[in-house]
Image (cartoon, helix red, strand yellow):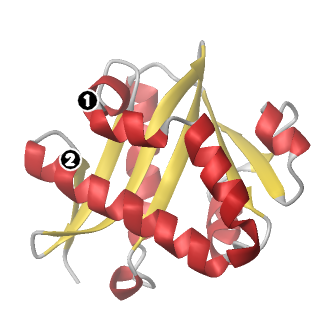
Amino acid sequence: MSVLIDPARSDDDIAEVTRLAWEFVAFLKDRYPERIAQIDEYLERQRFVQMLADFRSYFNPPKGECVLARLEGVGVGIVMLKPVQGELCEMNRMFVTPKARGYGVGRRLCTTLFDRARALGYRQMRLGALDRHDEALGLYRSLGFEPDPEPDEHAANVPGVISLRMHLL
């Protein structure tokens, strides 16, 4: 499987990212039906719709980034980066479609994002994940993420949300 991973820049890239971001939301709601209200509230607080609508302002340098995995020209995975404060950024919306899972696409997306984050001057990265998202949590831990000593308010106050952090140096 020959998957290309590049920063999302073109209008076509952004359309694919947007499609995949909504597919990720549908995946979460399907997997965690008891958390649909919590997921909707989180997306509202994160200004998910607005960020996708103004993609380049949020997910392109100099502060943000998004990398897109394509298989035969079709988007099969994404991961986004946004600034938190100073040298700390947040990785989110990491998603790989079912047909591309098991081929290391998620790991490649993450390591590409780490390189992009370093190039933007970030030295630490955090993320939040749901506690039953075992595949993702295993990947994150294998990449060097550890429990976040200073989780954000959402992760600190919502049961079932795990906050992880890693140093990018």
Report x, y in % for residue 122: 52, 23
Left or right, 135 with reference to 34: left
Instruction: Please provide percent x and percent y for residue 168.
Output: 58, 34
- Residue 116 versus residue 93 in the image, above or below: above
**Type of amino acid at the residue the image marks with label 2:** Ile
What residue is shown at x 39% (from left), y 34% (from top)?
50
Of the pair 145 and 70, the residue shown nearer to us: 70
Quarter of image, res 152: top right
**Sequence-wise, which precedes: disc 2 or disc 1?**
2
Name the amino acid type tagged 1. Answer: Arg
The answer to which of 18 and 141 lies nearer the viewer is: 18
The answer to whether residue 42 shows anywhere in this view is yes
Is any part of residue 68 visible from this angle?
A: no
Vertical placement of 104 versus 167: above or below? below
**Dot 2: within a 10 Å radius of its alpha carbon, few (fewer than 14), some, or many (20 or more) residues?**
many
- Whether label 2 touches label 1, CB < 8 Å: yes
> In the current view of this chain or complex, which residue is farthest to the top?
86
Q: Nearer the viewer, residue 29 or 4?
A: 29
Q: Position of residue 56 (x, y in %)?
A: 25, 29
Label 1 SS = helix
**Residue 10, position as x, y percentages in the image:** 10, 42
The residue carrying mark 1 is 56
Q: Secondary structure at mark 2?
A: helix
Q: Looking at the image, which residue is at 21% across and 58% down?
A: 16
The circle drawn on residue 118 is: none
| Quarter of image, res 60 | top left
Give the number of marks: 2
Mark number for residue 14? 2
x 62%, y 57%: residue: 143
Label 1 Cα crowd, 10 Å radius (few <14 / some 14-19 / many 20+): some
Residue at image location 29% in from the left, 37% down from the top: 53
Q: Which quadrant would the N terminus be assigned to in this image?
A: bottom left
